[in-house]
């Protein structure tokens, strides 16, 4: 558990860093970069949650289905949030696979700066914050147990 706890804590710190960068990008109207950082923060946060219950996270971006599969291993307060967390994890799946937040829509010749709006970036940021907050609660619970 110690190694998993250390890794989970490191993932959470990395997620925090990405969200600080995402907030700055949002303020600078760099919406594509904001979204990219939010995607990474969600992935890191949820992989930290899996590590906290002793599950080696798979090498995929969307770990929502894994959260659902092992939901019974989480404390009740976290278990109740799994459907929402899994939905947030799934939301950027298309984004990560095709990398439009980084490269844009190459088929249509649209750069990433033209693909995203402020409301979309703000939603990504707020969702990533909520995921991180839930995982931080889980970390505190696991440490105090």
Image (cartoon, rainbow, N blue to C red):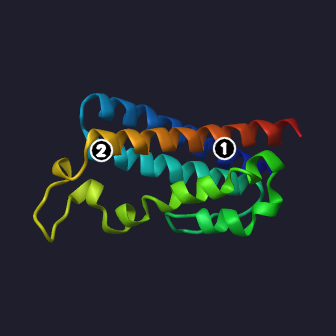
Q: Is residue 56 visible?
A: no
Q: On the picture, is 63 further left or further right than 52? A: left
Q: Position of residue 120 (x, y in %)?
A: 34, 45
| Dot label at residue 33 | 2
13 over 4 or under it: above or below: above
Where in the figure is residue 97, as x and y percent of width and height?
Answer: 37, 68
Q: Is residue 36 toward the left or the right of residue 145 in the image?
A: left
In front here: 84 or 45? 84
Q: Residues within 10 Å of mark 1 (few under 14, many from 20)?
A: many
Give the vertical position of 21 relative to 103 (above or below).
Answer: above
Most foreground residue, 139 or 32: 32
Query: Between marks 2 and 1, how big is the CA–CA gap?
Result: 23 Å
Q: In percent of the image, x 38 and y 66: which residue is there?
A: 94
Q: Residue at x 25, y 48 (%)?
A: 116
Residue 117 at x, y = what percent? 25, 44
Dot 2: few (<14), some (14–19), or many (≥20) neighbours within 10 Å?
A: many
- Work out whether 22 lies above or below 86: above
Q: Residue at x 52, y 38 (%)?
A: 129
Give the residue at mark 1: 135
Residue 96, image quadrant: bottom left
> Please, what secondary structure does the residue beneath circle 1 have?
helix
Residue 76 position, x and y percent, is 82, 50
Q: Is residue 62 visible?
A: yes
The residue furthest right is 145
């Amino acid at each position: 558990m110690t190694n998993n706890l250390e890794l989970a804590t490191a993932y959470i710190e990395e997620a925090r860093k990405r969200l600080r960068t995402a907030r700055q990008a949002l303020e600078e109207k760099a919406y594509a970069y904001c979204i990219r950082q939010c995607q990474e923060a969600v992935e890191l946060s949820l992989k930290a949650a899996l590590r906290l219950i002793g599950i080696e996270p798979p090498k995929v971006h969307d770990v929502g289905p894994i959260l659902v599969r092992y939901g019974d291993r989480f404390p009740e307060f976290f278990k109740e949030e799994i459907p929402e967390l899994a939905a947030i994890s799934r939301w950027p799946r298309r984004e990560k696979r095709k990398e439009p937040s980084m490269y844009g829509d190459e088929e249509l010749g649209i750069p990433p700066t033209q693909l995203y709006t402020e409301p979309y970036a703000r939603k990504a940021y707020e969702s990533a914050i909520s995921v991180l907050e839930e995982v931080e609660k889980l970390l505190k619970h696991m440490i105090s147990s």
